[in-house]
Image: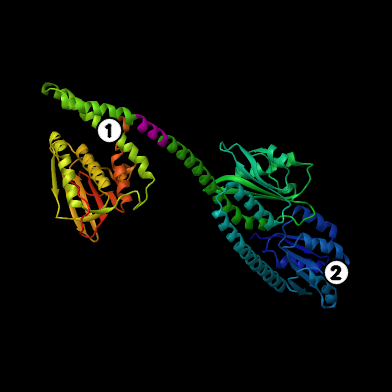
Amino acid sequence: MTGPDILLIADDARLIQTTEEALQDFGRLVVRSDPDEVTLSLARNRSVAVLLVEVTIPAREPDWFKGLRAAQAEAVLLLLATPEQLPAVVPLTQYELSEIVLLPVSAAALRDAVARAMQRRRSSRELARLRALVPLYEMSRMFMLQTDLDELLHRVLETAVNETGAQRASLMLIDENRLYLTIQAAVGISTDVISQTQVRLGEGIAGWVAKTGQPLVVNGPDDLPEFLRQSMLGGVLRSALSLPLTAKGQVIGVINLTKTTLEAPFVLGDAELLSVLVGQAAVAIVNARLIKQMEAAYEELSRLEHLKTEFINIAAHELRSPVSIVLGYASLLAEMAPPEMQDLIDPLHSQARQLERIVDDLFHLDYLKSLKEFDPGVDIKTLDLADCARFAVREAQAVAEVRNLQLALTTPEPVWVLGDLPSLRRILRHLLDNALKFTPAGGQVQINVIAEGGEAFLRVQDTGPGVPSEERERIFAPFYQVGSSLRRSHGGMGLGLSLARRMVQTQGGRLWLEARPGPGASFCLALPLAPQKPAGECG
């Protein structure tokens, strides 16, 4: 059975024999009688779990024993003494003594004493670990709330330094090509060193930790991986701790902590404790990076959106005057031309009207962005939605006949709503234009108006191809149409539905595309009902 190392410091042959017999299953037992030999032994094996010390040796070498206890602060200490030697034990109780074992002692009694001491050590370490995890967990939660990457890196590093007492520290991140580590935050390191430091993955302590993903505690050459030992000979020996920052199974960086030789060295417990910190810190760093990338992307989108808006505004203003002139002359020609010329002039007049509507839509798009629900700029009155629907159907009837479509209206009389008359006319025109545009010849467009639950609902249903479920919200975005803009089989700029929804929202209403089985689309307009006091007409 393997286990922690046990160091017996004694020169009594019988005691040594009893200890070897008692602790043969507890782990590797090292026996030393000379203080100098103990020092050499600990230089090769610094992690000792149990110290068994015959009291006569520290009584002779009190300064040496004080240094030993400081170096092995985490080891369990049992003093072995006869009843006559108990007065010599009293000065040694200041060194976190676990138990006094009276000599002579049987193998079974010694085994029980060591087992009790080791159990107390495990319980004490677990309690200390749990107590330390609480503040670390709270600090980890704070990391997750930090979105500024530079501030987050410095807070992570400062927390690590405060928890370990390190004098110098650095937080290094791996570059996008996963070739080098560079310092992104530091404590106790000059700016020149920070700017010049670039470590290739696999090189040095930090590079080895980044490449392997394994933490490393270095208190001497023996702690280094074999391939690093020769390159670091002759360096100033310090206690160092290097931990990988791992998120989603990938190492993204390394935290390096260093103590001078005058401070208590790092132990594996420090690495275990800080693993909670760096685990949460790595996730927080990834999140902060994503947020930073999203902010940059959003800024770029905002810039492009601003350029697009500026272009639309300029184009609309520049087009308005020439379109007005073209439409004016087209209207004049339509009135003055002889009958035999009407077939040539009517398409010109129709297309000029279409250009006018497009330019008007562009102006409305920019205007509507600045309006809020029930904005003072919108003239809300009590209107008959049924009458508005009839007016829209009459207006669209000619187009329906040309395209060989049936246009039907079902509505009670009347349905009073709160709305803005010009906007409501425009909304219904866009909905009907959209339905007529996408319904093939021989199809039908049905308009239904009902009042229910404090709202009025107007539905425009067609027998066209319908809209895929993933496109249901996108079709309300400005300039969006189902299918590639370069392969559109239908006219228009993709502004109608966007304008209609925005105008509905400014009147406190809603507009959406209903989910329904089979082909065809069903757009539903909802407006708040009003008292039956007409204040406007739609026709």
Q: Main secondary structure of the magenta part?
A: helix
Give coordinates of residue 512: x percent, y percent.
28, 49
- How many residues crowd mark 1 within 10 Å: few (<14), some (14–19), many (20+)? some
Residue at which label 1 appears: 356
Stretch in magenta: 309-318
- Left or right, 372 with respect to 417, comes to right
Please tell me whether residue 133 is drawn above or below residue 346 in the rendered image: below
Under circle 1, the secondary element is: helix
Give coordinates of residue 470: x percent, y percent.
31, 44
Under circle 2, the secondary element is: helix
Amino acid type shown at disc 1: Glu
Residue at which label 2 appears: 56
Judged by depth in the image, the label closer to the viewer, 2 or 1, is 1
Mark found first going from the N terminus, 2 or 1: 2
- How many residues crowd mark 2 within 10 Å: few (<14), some (14–19), many (20+)? some
Amino acid type shown at disc 2: Thr
- Seen at 22% across and 54% down, the residue is 535
Q: Does the segment drawn in magenta span residue 97? A: no
Give coordinates of residue 369: x percent, y percent.
38, 44
Label 2–label 1 contact, CB within 8 A? no
